[in-house]
Amino acid sequence: MRISFRKEKAVAADSNVTDRSNPCRANREAAGFTITEVVIAILIIAIGAAALMGCFSYGFRVIGQIQENQRATQVMVEKAETLRLYSWDQVNTSGFIPANFSATYDGDYATSNYTGTIYTGQVTIGAFPYNTSYKDKMRRLDLTLTWTSQNTTRTRSLTTYIAKDGIQNYVY
């Protein structure tokens, strides 16, 4: 009995020679991608693009809320600093300081025709809450600001104090 081994020629991996013993493999190398591979690749790209758009949408919404909060802080500080400039007699005169006010997101626009964010505020001036020797020379100022954004009512508040011998004596 005689055994013979046939030598096969080694082919480099980057060669254009196709394997004729497996016709499916030969056609596959020449054809490119299958429809299944293309559909899966498109699906992966679509999911990634949808996630990216969702991230952008969320980011823009959060930035809008931050801007509205920052504007609310500006409105309250502006109102508090204005009230601190009133004389002591004006601060203590009932009805001199309006209890309600409004402001817009963009500044000094009239609120009647304004379509953006409108802030409405309440001012409360009360007695100094601590029992001290200077209790009668101080007042407590409470500011509350409310606005509606994205169908949600938002509120911020600020509490500060006004002194009889405060900043208004340097102005008047």
Image (cartoon, grey):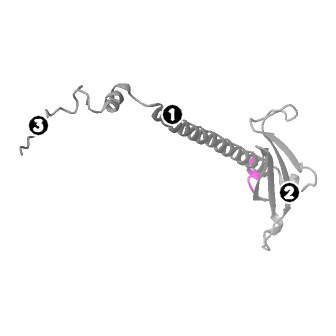
> Is any atom of residue 61 visible in this view?
yes
Decide if residue 139 is on the left or right side of residue 22: right
Q: Residue at 61% across / 41% down in the picture? A: 54
- Asked if 24 appears above or below 146 in the picture, the reply is above
Instruction: Give the amino acid type for the residue marked by disc 1 in the picture.
Output: Val
Report which residue position mark 2 lands on: 124
- Asked if 81 appears above or below 16 in the picture, the reply is below
Q: Residue at 88% across / 34% down in the picture? A: 112
Numbered range of the magenta stretch: 165-171
Q: Earlier in the sequence, mark 3 or mark 1?
A: 3
Report which residue position mark 3 lands on: 6
Give neighbour class at mark 3: few <14, some 14-19, many 20+ (Cα, 10 Å): few
Report which residue position mark 1 lands on: 39
Quarter location, residue 108: top right
Observer-side mark, 2 or 1, equals 1
The picture places residue 19, in percent across and down from the top left corner, at 25, 30
Decide if residue 25 is on the left or right side of residue 145: left
Q: Earlier in the sequence, mark 2 or mark 1?
A: 1
The picture places residue 38, in percent across and down from the top left corner, at 47, 32
Q: Nearer the viewer, residue 154 or 144?
A: 154
Quarter location, residue 52: top right
Q: Residue at 32% across / 30% down in the picture? A: 23
Q: Secondary structure at mark 3?
A: loop
